[in-house]
Image (cartoon, rainbow, N blue to C red):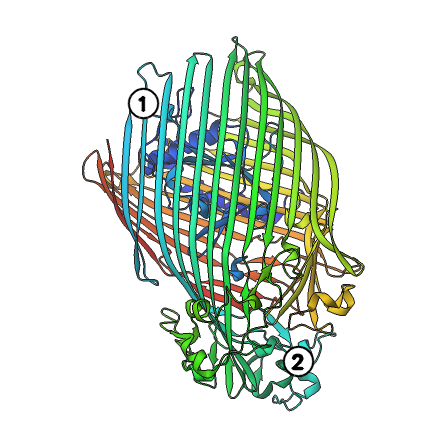
Amino acid sequence: MALFDLRATRVALACSSALTSLVAVPALGQEAAQDAVSSEPAIIVTGFRESLSSALGLKKNETAAIDAIKAEDIAEFPDLNLAESLQRIPGVAISRVNGEGRNISVRGLGPEYTRVRINGMEAIGTTGGTDNSGGVNRGRGFDFNIFSSDLFNSLAVRKTASADVEEGSLGATVDLTIARPFDFRKPTVSISAQGSYNDLSRKVTPRISTLATTTNDAGTFGVLMSISYEERRVREEGANITRWTYGGFNGGFNAASTLPGKTIAQINDNNSTGNGLFHPRIPGLVSYDINQKRLGAAASVQMRPAESTLVSIDGLYSRLDGTRSEAQLQAISFSRSGSGKPQTIIRDGMVDANNNIISGRFDNVDLRSQARFDKLVTDFYEVTGNLEQQLGDSLKFTGLVGYSKSSFRNPVQTTVTIDAINTGNFQYDFSSRFPAIVPGVDVTSPASFAFVTGTSEVRIRPQTVDNAFTTAKGALEWKASDVLTFKAGMDWRRFTYNSTEQRRLLGETRVNTLSAAQVAAGTQLFDGFGRGLNLPQGTPTGWVIPNLDVFAANYGIYSDPLYQTGGVENATARGSYITVTEKDLGAWAMTAFNLGDVGVPLRGDVGIRFVNTRQLSTGYASQGATINLVTAERSYDRWLPSANFVFDVTPQLLVRFAAAKTLARAGIASISPGGNLNVSGGNRSFSSGNPDLKPTESTNLDFAVEWYPAKGAIYSVALFQKDIGTFVQTLAVTAPFAALGLPDSLLAGTTASPTDDFIVSRPVNSNGGKLQGFEINVQQPFTFLPGALANFGALANYTYVKSDIEYLTSSNGASSITAPLLGLSKNAANFTLYYEDSKFSVRGSVAYRSNYLTAVPGTEGNAWNGTNSTTNLDAQMSYAITDNLKVSLEAINLLDTKNDQFVDETNRLNVLTHSGRQFNLGAKFTF
């Protein structure tokens, strides 16, 4: 295969030529670009345009491929959320949860393949999401929604590797840096306050931040402190389908079922030959009411006891404290074996060309209403100490020690369901993207529902996840001449992971049956559903749900021994008890060179890194008829060479080339030797870890051409290839519980039986494949235009990525399919148009991301799971009333973009929710 896809290369070069021609004439009259990075301390820039120019100076002078974003004013990042700022960088795409960015992908590689460093040391931040947004983060990906962006001064995305940067990333290393006192020329205080309004939740919440810094007259000691606090009230709601499955799954439909032109054998086909008829697994409606409080603080102390010594001590703390209330209405029959689907009768329906039963009318349908409440708390803190010591004119030592910890607590996760059994005349219609879901009974009446042992459920599932890093590293840098610099160093990291969970000991369907009067007293009407969704006719806008306060106070769900919870003694909770200890020891050496002083316009670095990894993991696993705590150990070594070259064709034009070997370690929970059994409503699954997983490795090639025609302007094209081997995938197959080799006693207290089909998943190594793509980046202030038009400017970038990854589809490895890498959007683009003068600033930004896959292969006959394309529009304006006082208005998600998830190549609807538009009005005072 060619190094880069020829057609993609031609497109990139053609686009680059066209874009260059648009500005070539006016650019000729401009002055040459000035470097924004010098040997002077980094001073806080002011204004959006200056922040762009400063970031370009950093990019131009680095030998590695780096893109950066700078704060545009004191304690003022360009976006409320760091992930949303990152998406303006070429090659970066984000995924949003509850209306704000949570994770990022870089050049098609998802969060598991992207390392995040805060103030120079690696860290992992963990939060909890809704079930359909990935739930609790138990991997290596970083959740950016932990932090307020006001705490940070800059972020950088390092897309090519060098020996002095720790390994662990295939996509990129992201550096987040707080402000430090020596960044400022004079003592400074800044205070800002905003009111935030969401048009779906219809609530106003506060956002406040402050920063204060001072340095002594001699410039040898400085202190900085910043604090931020904000509240968010968000409502997210829509359709939640929980995948699609074939007619023969879970016992098939009742033999009395009829569909025009179909026999009962065709209706209940088991899809063994690909001819099954598919239906929504749990057609339902969902609403989440999310209430968050985010408190953050950053502190920095810098000391320069001598001209040759710089000491920096940085601290960062953040707490994300929230609650989530959930209301769902589900037709659970379609996913329930035994008394569920086998009793459900299809009275009429329509089958489309893709064998989907897209509409139907049914009898004997079990309906379920459920209420869930979560309390979610993440505490993150980090302390680092940095030393820069000049040892003579040519030798320099740098060192860092640090500790970070992310502690996630979900102390309350309670779900209560009420059920309406064998209801008649239930209908659904998926002929439009948002489906019609029409119950045949009055779902606003408590009389339609019952709370009965063996059918209804009380789920109590508190859980925790802790991550911690301890880091120490040091390096020596010897400037041998004006041309050559030699660097060498060592780094050590210790990572620990621990997760727990509690579940009910006697089973979640063991409840105290309530009378009709008790059900009426223990329920409440949830209403107001569907604003902005254009609900199809017949779809309810409200339904009764359990009142969790009443169930706790009057029905004893926290006090009655029937509802007692347990941990490792509980078969369905035991699998969440995982510990991992990982120690990484690295040693590296590199040569940096700049041949400009000898008449050769070439600079770069060449180096090699050696890393030793030792992993110790524990988990609970079946050993015959017993379940024991199992420990697994492994270690491996890797040599990782890297090289970056920059050819400065002219002061404004440069060409980059980079080559490197990189690795990303397997997901944290994936290397547990244990397994996890889950029976939840109609869902049945068993997942296990694999402590023998090899790290994912890649050989990378990068090539770029960058033109800087004026200050703050760039036109560039970058091509990249990653040859990924030993790729880690999750292999999911369907099998009856009896075939798993597990004791039947594990099912005690659940509604599952040994003959029920379970989705069985396990991470395995596959052969990987190649990822190739290109980026086009344009940034241009319109200073060549006359009058006020010179205050305009634009940013635009486009990324194309393709990959062909081999995924195993059978447990013995005999069959496989080729599909794109998980999380990879083939097309991504961003565009920002801005205006800025001495008083007024306004900008609008559009971000597009094409669809991407989230699971390959899929389950229950679906080829895969994925998320459809998104287009987000944000805007911001501000006005400086005086030099010290500024007012601003921000608008986020103006298109109210939907979270549209699908299964299979036929785009069967899985999730379709929206979270509304966000508006922030505020003022900032600086002195």
Mark 2–mark 1 distance (CA, rounded to whole Å): 73 Å
Give the image location of residue 670, x and y in percent: 67, 50
Q: Which residue is mark 2?
A: 338
Q: Is residue 757 left or right of residue 868?
A: right
Within 10 Å of disc 1 (Cα), the crowding (few <14, some 14-19, many 20+) is some
**Residue at the outermost left position:** 882
Find numbered disc 2 in the image and state the secondary structure of the residue it sits on: loop
**Which mark, residue 835?**
none
Give the image location of residue 782, x and y in percent: 32, 39
Position of 241 relative to 597 (above/below): below
Q: Which residue is mark 1?
A: 185
Within 10 Å of disc 2 (Cα), the crowding (few <14, some 14-19, many 20+) is some
Position of 38 relative to 926 (above/below): above
Closest to the observer, 145 or 24: 145
Q: Is residue 633 left or right of residue 835?
A: right
Q: Is residue 347 visible?
A: yes
Give the image location of residue 343, x and y in percent: 62, 85
Give the image location of residue 688, x and y in percent: 70, 56
Q: Earlier in the sequence, mark 2 or mark 1?
A: 1
Q: Comparing marks 2 and 1, which lies closer to the viewer?
A: 2
Position of 280 relative to 490 (above/below): below
Closest to the observer, 280 or 126: 126
The amino acid type found where label 1 is placed reads Arg
Closest to the observer, 642 or 245: 245
Q: Quadrant of the C terminus?
A: top left
The amino acid type found where label 2 is placed reads Gly
Q: Is residue 613 left or right of residue 514?
A: right
